Image: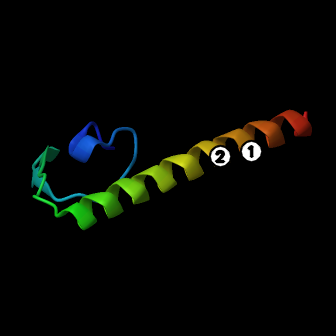
Amino acid sequence: MTDGQYGISGVYLSLPCVVGREGIEKIVELPLGDDERHGLLTSAAILKTTYETLKKEEKIAVANAT
């Protein structure tokens, strides 16, 4: 889960990492061009919005089922 990389938090993304015996040691932030950064931020926002929408719909479905 991102924790401020590229200015993004709270979204699971595939990012380049250094992996050691105990898992991820470091997420590597590569330099991005303006278009790449914009695309990454847009994708992260869409993922975050979709996740939040699904969580709300799940709560509604559980409430309606009881």
Q: Residue at horizontal 9%, vertical 53%? A: 18
Residue closest to the eye, 38 or 66: 38
Location of the N terminus by quadrant is: top left
In percent of width and height, residue 21 lies at 10, 48
Q: Name the disc covering residue 57, or none.
A: 1
Residue 65, located in which quarter of the rendered image?
top right
Location of the C terminus by quadrant is: top right
In percent of width and height, residue 12 lies at 38, 50
- Where disc 2 sits, the SS reads helix
Question: Is label 2 in contact with label 1 (beta carbons under 8 Å)?
Answer: yes
Amino acid type at image mark 1: Glu
Q: Name the disc covering residue 53, or none.
A: 2
Residue furthest front in the image: 34
Q: Residue at horizontal 31%, vertical 59%? A: 38
**Left or right of 48, for residue 33:** left
Q: Residue at horizontal 41%, vertical 59%? A: 43
Amino acid type at image mark 2: Thr
How many numbered marks, from 0 up? Answer: 2
